[in-house]
Amino acid sequence: MSDDHIVSSFDEDMKELETLFLQMGKMVGDQLKAATRALRKEDRTLAKQVVKGDKQLNELESELNDLAIKILALRQPFATDLRHVVTTLKSAGHLERMGDLTRNMAQRTNTIAKAEADTGPIETLIRMSDLVQGMIKSIMTAYQTRDAELARKVRAEDETVDMSHNALFREMLTYMMEDARNISGCMHVLFMAKNIERMGDNVADIAKEIIYMTTGDWPEGKRSKGDKTSKIMVEPDN
């Protein structure tokens, strides 16, 4: 086998690996958008479609993992190529977890719609979802273009998601205190909001991997975290 053929095969494998990763990223963003729309419309049919869609995402991750192992075992990449393969492999795991979180959102939407439960205001949750959807698109661009600066910006945006989560947490607690009948629906919304907050964390983790992939150095300092929900207390009015 000629050296040219070996190089060509390696390039094809690397291109396919990248394509699979980008497909996973787009699917996660689309699933989050659909899950949010299902909640807004209380659309049980759409929610069930999101749940079923998680299987396809898992299949893509399995295909990506197999290809990454093949590249590592047979091609033995080094330096930048090695960082690219390892980053893609690790980041795909984050996308798979985001798919699980989106599936959980859709399952809760189905429960809310079926029970006709009152969720209270969900505008803040929708804004959180929009923020994370934007982060997903940007981090896929950063991965594809090897843009470390864009990855740093995406990583910093997660704090905005955390702040929105704090605001929604307060809103839901207040709404539940006004009428105990609101508790069931609002609790599901709180869990959904936590799912979206965790998705933001996963995107930030992918950003960290891309910075390393591109520069060969890990980001300095700890990422700023704005999630304070574990410390928030709302006192009833006397």
Image (spheres, rainbow, N blue to C red):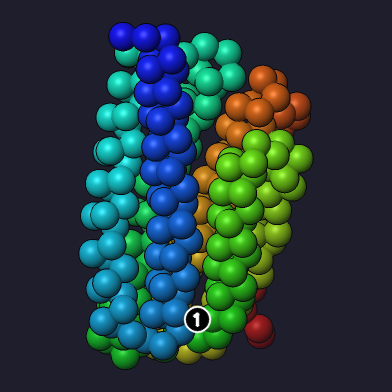
Quadrant containing the N terminus in the rendered view = top left
Give the side of residue 84 with respect to residue 67, left or right. right
203 shown above or below 232:
above
Residue shown at 59% from the left, 41% from the top: 143
The quadrant where residue 181 appears? bottom left
Which element is circle 1 on? helix
Q: Is residue 121 above or below residue 229?
A: below
- In terms of depth relative to the viewer, which is nearer, 87 or 191? 87
Which quadrant of the figure has residue 6? Answer: top left
Crowding at dot 1, Cα within 10 Å, few <14 / some 14-19 / many 20+, comes out as some
Percent across and percent down for residue 40 are 46, 84
Residue matched to label 1: 176
Position of residue 104 in the picture relative to residue 148 (left or right): left
Instruction: Write the residue at 66% across / 83% down.
Output: 237
Asked if 27 appears above or below 97 in the picture, the reply is below
- Residue at 32 percent across and 13 percent down: it is 74
- Residue 28, percent from left and from top: 43, 57
Q: Is residue 213 visible?
A: yes
State the image coordinates of residue 140 (x, y, percent, origin top left): 56, 48
Q: Is residue 55 left or right of residue 18?
A: left
Residue 229 visible from this viewpoint: no
Amino acid type, mark 1: Met
User: How far across and how far down the image is residue 238, in percent?
Assistant: 66, 85
- Residue depicted at x 39% and y 43%: 20
